[in-house]
Amino acid sequence: MTKPTKARIRQSFERAAPTYDSAAEVQRRICRQLAQGLPENHGNIRRLLDAGCGTGFAQQLLQARYPQAHAVALDFSAAMLERIGAPCCRLAADLARLPLAAASLDLYWSSLAVQWCDLHQTLREAHRVLRPGGRIALATLGPATFHELRTAFADVDSHRHTLGFHSAEEVAQLATANGFVAVNVQKSTEIAHYPDFRSLLKAVKAIGANQLGEGRRTALLSRTAFARAEAACETLRTSEGLPLTYEVVYLYGGT
């Protein structure tokens, strides 16, 4: 699957850092849901990684559940790391090339970050840094995510307007192929609503999700093209507003 360059991803999230928390209600709901599947055996979690931590919302959940654990918060964006309020070890690094020793973690946690990465390579790294008996808890996005944007722009142009996302079945297969056992994959749908098309697009940009890599539009939309996309999106309006769907894939497993 085509991904944006790492430089573009970093730039996008550097810019999004000041606005991320104000626009990330769905992301917080997904984080809480992912936490519900975490192991309860607190004593076995001595060192954990929040991979792709963003502004650190998950640190509150993880440290409350595992207060004795040494927490490492890792993100590609230094600006995101600077906004973490919880006490933790901050690390600016690439999920696909973790600067951590093999078998050094008890829990690998990642909520809505790996969709930006090569999933095979990221899962291979996750398995490498987990000790035998370690656990992974991961949330990523499935193919139905942002389908409203694809509908809006379908008759406007042929550019890509969303990332390509792995299905739940593909996530399970890649986890197994990279050595994880007792793999448990679940799906859910989260929907955000917006009063108008501009607000929807602004929210996508505010969380840094507007980088698409090759095939994306590089020129501004004309007024006519924007109006056509807006009209197409309006056909999806519900009583709550214009919907934006997140198909969420949750992965749990062990080593």
Image: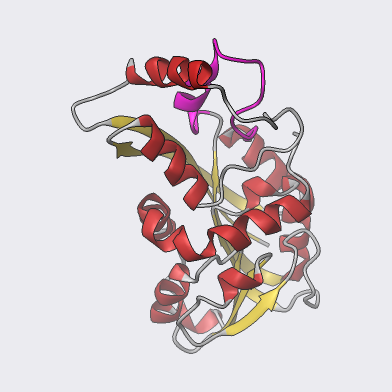
Q: Is residue 40 left or right of residue 10?
A: left
* Residue 255 drawn at (x, y percent): 68, 62
- 171 vs 14, nearest the viewer: 14
Q: Magenta span has 72? A: no
Magenta range is 144-165
Q: Residue at x 38, y 50 (%)?
A: 26
Question: Which is the main secondary structure of the residues drawn in magenta?
Answer: loop
In the rendered image of this protein, does residue 194 appear above or below residue 88? above
- 167 vs 113, nearest the viewer: 113
Q: Residue at x 35, y 54 (%)?
A: 25
**Residue 179 visible in the displayed image:** no
* Residue 188 drawn at (x, y percent): 40, 39
Q: Residue furthest front?
A: 223
Considering the image in quadrants, where does the N terminus appear?
Answer: top right
- Tell me where residue 142 sits by quadrant: top right
Q: Residue at x 75, y 63 (%)?
A: 94
In the rendered image of this protein, does residue 250 appear above or below residue 128? above
* Residue 73 drawn at (x, y percent): 59, 75
* Residue 60 drawn at (x, y percent): 41, 76
